[in-house]
Structure formats: structure tokens, C-alpha cells
Image: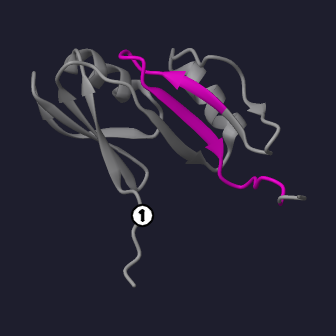
Amino acid sequence: MAQVSLAGLTLHVADLERSVEFYRRLPGTEVHVYQAGLFAMVTIGAGRIGLLQRAAGKFHVELEVDDLDAYYEEVRQAGIAPKGPPVRHPWGERDFVVLDPDGFALEFEAADEEAPADQG
């Protein structure tokens, strides 16, 4: 059976240039393709996010980070304000959230921390 993994996704954004500027500031990202007013391809580690100029929509994106606390500080130093500091949820995951200019939620989660096994 073939194995499938998420390689990337495309977000519909209201203002491509504003979104490209945001993603360029986000630590660990690089804009590889840019067609003004139309499309941009941003890489984040081994994954990618496409930005397509259209009516803005909503989407929740999960990104694993090997050192969550250090990355949180890098994001803040880049002038991007997370919704709050890293938090641990009742299910064991630890994360923080950043909203991009169109309101897309980017959830950065600790890659090295696993949720506790189901006790039920």
C-alpha cells in the first residue's frame, strides 16, 4: 500500500503581497516562487504552503517544531505576536498559535512531546 503524507497546502489570501511579507518574516521560511498579485510558494522545512490571491478563506495548519520554546522566542523577535505563550492542553499536546494577515491559524506544536496514552 502506498504511503501518503502532507506535503503542503494552498491558502486563498485576500492580499498576496501582505501575506508574502508576513511569511518572509516568519523564522525558518523561504519564498521560492513569487508571481505578484497571483501566487507564491513558501517552504517551511520539508513542507510547503501555497498562497493564491482569491477571496480569503479560513484554515488551521499544524506545524511540528523541535524546540517549541526557542521557536516561540524567534517568532516574537521577528515582530510577530502569537495569540499567547506555549500551553499544554489536557490531551498532552503543547503548542502556541499565530494568526497570519488573513486570519489563518498556524499552530506550532512540540515535535518531541507526545500526548499521554488513552487510559480509558
Which amino acid, mark 1? Ser
**Residue situated in front as seen by the camera: 58 or 82:** 58
Using a 10 Å C-alpha cutoff, classify the residue at mark 1 as few (fewer than 14 neighbours), some (14 to 19) or many (20 or more).
few
Q: In this view, does 7 lie above or below 36?
A: below
Q: In this view, does 112 lie above or below 82?
A: below
Rendered location of residue 43, percent (x, y): 34, 45
Rendered location of residue 23, percent (x, y): 36, 28
51 vs 73, left or right, is left
Say which element carries label 1: loop
65 vs 3, left or right, is right
Q: Image quarter for residue 67?
A: top right
Q: Image quarter for residue 74?
A: top right
Is residue 45 shown in magenta? Answer: no
**Residue situated in front as seen by the camera: 56 or 67:** 56
27 vs 95, left or right, is left
Look at 59% across and 37% down and name the residue there.
Answer: 108
Look at 42% across and 64% down and name the residue there.
Answer: 5
103 vs 64, left or right, is left
Q: How many marks?
A: 1
Residue furthest bottom in the image: 1
Rendered location of residue 110, percent (x, y): 68, 46
Residue furthest right in the image: 119
Look at 78% across and 52% down and name the residue there.
Answer: 115
Look at 40% across and 25% down and name the residue there.
Answer: 25
Query: Residue under circle 1?
Result: 5
Is residue 115 shown in magenta? Answer: yes
The residues colored magenta run: 96-117
